Amino acid sequence: MSIKMDQDQIEKVVELAAPVSRVWRALTDHVEFGEWFRVRLDGPFEVGETTTGRITYPGYEHMEWVSVTEVMDHEQLFVFSWPPSTIDPDTEYAADAKVLVEFRLKPTDGGGTRLTIKETGFMQFPESKRLEALRSNTEGWDIQADHIAAHVERD
């Protein structure tokens, strides 16, 4: 597992002992995604559509989930966006402000998957809040990488 971070993005690479098809299903099926990500989603991911729900991760149950599915390139790329106001409701953001989360899948030798998770758009946060958002989300992706690994590797 490796991680790269700068002021605008977080990038994490995870080697998973599961085939691409299994990882894809865990990412794009809203029920499975909810199991490992710890969120109860109200409906499926559909390109151009908003998905809502409620976080179920302990300590974050008060948070709502709002995302827009941007790209679903079968077994290669899944991208959704979320509004920065979700974690920073005290700041007024442009109506089109969004943070992008990309999941890129590549098969590895031996039948596994290299999953690259990239989250971009942190420069939209005020400087006084940016580093905290980056730190918090970096820690979050460390946890979520472990969650998806446990989820797809248990089969």
Image (cartoon, grey):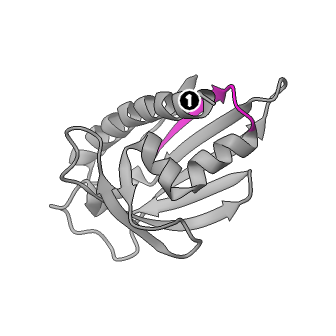
**Would residue 31 be found to the left or right of residue 20 on screen?**
left
- Horizontal side of residue 89 vs 152, given as left or right: left
**Camera-side residue of 29 and 103:** 29
Residue 154, horizontal then vertical, whole percent:
59, 27
Residue 111: which quarter of the image?
A: top right
Height in image: 36 above or below 154?
A: below
**Where is 112 relative to 62, above or below?**
above
- The residue that appears at 37% across and 66% down in the rendered structure is 52
Q: Is 117 one of the magenta-colored residues? A: no
Report the magenta residues as a range: 9-19
Q: x%, y% of residue 151?
A: 54, 33
Residue 44, x across and y down, in percent: 51, 66
Residue drawn at the location 56% of the way across and 41% of the way down = 117
Q: Badge 1 is on which residue?
A: 149
**Could you tell me residue 115's position as x and y percent?**
65, 37
In this view of the protein, which residue sits in the foreground, 51 or 139? 51
Q: Which residue lies furthest to the left in this view?
A: 90
Prevalent SS, magenta region: strand
Please give the name of the residue rendered at 58% of the width and 46% of the height, measured from the top-left corner.
26
Q: Is mark 1 on a helix, strand or loop?
A: helix
Q: Residue 116 falls in which quadrant of the image? A: top right
Q: Which amino acid does label 1 sit on?
A: Ala
Residue at the spot x=34%, y=77% of the render? 95
